């Protein structure tokens, strides 16, 4: 396949265009609710950490809600995803139970790893979620392997693997992209370019204009998408996923956002210029979609207030359930552990 040019994806202009993407009004409201729930859970997690009720650390994907929810909503049952520490929205959009996600962060028995790991390293194969690992992007070869398995067994399934702008410089990313291109694997590479890798800005991270430029040099298409625009993300993710399912091989999505919190809760991100943060605050993904829904889908103040109440209740319930979940029994500490 000849390489094609990187193109900038622009927003979805009308409700008709959204309907053409297979999203009816209820679907649009669902996307909005999932973004609200993602943010609500992350805000609660940060508060619980500060109150000493959540051990370890806490990472948020603030600013990434549209990117995560938009991609995961374009997946179909049977597809698999290997999301990372900023992708709570992927778990939410795939139907993860909020209280279990909090349990995972809190080291409780109700979490996916039953207290053996933390963060979003939650395996949930029923929902097609492969647990991430700490060394980034060490899980990308696993997602690529899943795509190879789908290819060999002739199953019409697609794998998605995430990596950040920082992780994009690692060898695993290049090896996976090259292998997937050569074998035309059904995989979508999702790069969350949030402009900082811990404190390293993009100009110290890569020298090409777009990270998606790299896809063309491997022999497949790269698309740069505004990661704060949930419908543009959904449209490009859906196109990439269905292209892969139909045998068109891999595609890379570069979702451009700004990491709106520190690397994790201990980090005040004072190295990020305040004017940059202020500019991206104006492009808040939830605020943008709220405005779009009001002007294109006649969503009212009452509806958004009801949704906000529902989400607040869901977050409260998740917190209560997580705090009621027992600590793991120390006698089981080696159960399910490989070595
Ligand atoms: C192989 C490896 N090196 C270093 C780290 C330490 N580390 C954790 S997150 C991070 C920054 C990652 O930046 P990026 O890939 O852009 O993702 P982001 O955290 O910005 O979403 C680093 C250096 C790690 N987890 N794995």
Image: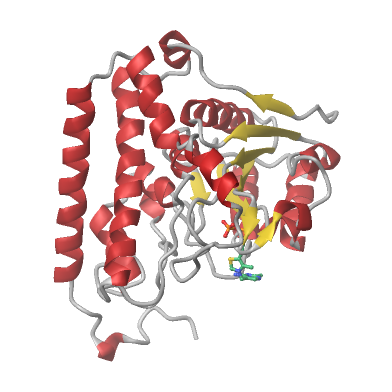
User: Which residue extends farthest top?
Assistant: 16
- Is residue 75 visible in this depiction of the protein? no
- Quarter of the displayed picture in which ligand 1 can be seen: bottom right
Give the camera-side residue of 217 and 127: 217
Q: Position of residue 217 (x, y in %)?
A: 85, 40
* Quadrant position of residue 317: bottom left
Q: Residue at x 51, y 49 (%)?
A: 81
- Is residue 37 visible in this depiction of the protein? yes
User: Which residue extends farthest front?
Assistant: 275
Q: In this image, 235 relative to 121: left or right?
A: right
Q: Residue at x 55, y 21 (%)?
A: 11
Give the camera-side residue of 168 and 154: 168
Q: Residue at x 36, y 51 (%)?
A: 126
Q: Quadrant of the N terminus?
A: top right
Q: Residue at x 25, y 74 (%)?
A: 53
Colour option used: secondary structure
Q: Position of residue 78 (x, y in %)?
A: 45, 41
| Vertical arrangement, residue 302 with respect to residue 284, above or below | above
* Quadrant position of residue 174: bottom right
Q: Position of residue 240 (x, y in %)?
A: 61, 31
Q: Position of residue 187 (x, y in %)?
A: 63, 42
């Amino acid at each position: 396949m000849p390489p094609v040019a990187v193109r900038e994806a622009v927003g979805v202009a009308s409700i008709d265009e959204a309907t053409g993407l297979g999203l009816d009004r209820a679907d649009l409201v669902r996307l909005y609710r999932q973004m609200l729930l993602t943010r609500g859970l992350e805000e609660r997690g940060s508060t619980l950490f500060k109150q000493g009720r959540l051990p370890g650390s806490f990472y948020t994907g603030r600013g990434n809600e549209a990117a995560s929810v938009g991609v995961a909503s374009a997946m179909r049952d049977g597809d698999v995803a290997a999301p990372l520490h900023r992708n709570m929205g992927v778990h939410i959009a795939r139907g993860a139970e909020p209280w279990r996600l909090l349990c995972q962060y809190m080291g409780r028995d109700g979490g996916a790893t039953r207290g053996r790991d933390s963060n979003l390293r939650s395996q949930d194969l029923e929902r097609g979620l492969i647990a991430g690992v700490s060394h980034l992007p060490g899980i990308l070869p696993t997602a690529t392997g899943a795509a190879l398995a789908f290819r060999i067994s002739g199953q019409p399934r697609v794998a998605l693997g995430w990596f950040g702008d920082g992780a994009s410089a690692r060898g695993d990313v290049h090896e996976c992209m090259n292998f997937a291109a050569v074998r035309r694997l059904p995989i979508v590479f999702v790069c969350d370019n949030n402009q900082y890798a811990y404190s390293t800005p993009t100009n110290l991270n890569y020298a090409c204009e777009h990270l998606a430029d790299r896809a063309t040099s491997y022999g497949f298409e790269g698309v740069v998408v505004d990661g704060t625009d949930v419908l543009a993300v959904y449209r490009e993710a859906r196109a990439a996923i269905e292209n892969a399912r139909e045998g068109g091989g891999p595609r890379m999505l570069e979702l451009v956002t700004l990491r709106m919190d520190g690397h994790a809760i201990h980090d005040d991100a004072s190295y990020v210029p305040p004017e940059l943060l202020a500019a991206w605050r104006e492009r808040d993904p939830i605020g943008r979609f709220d405005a779009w829904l009001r002007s294109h889908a006649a969503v009212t103040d009452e509806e958004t207030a009801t949704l906000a109440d529902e989400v607040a209740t869901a977050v409260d319930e998740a917190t209560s359930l997580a705090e009621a979940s027992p600590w793991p029994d120390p006698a089981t500490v080696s159960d399910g552990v490989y070595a």
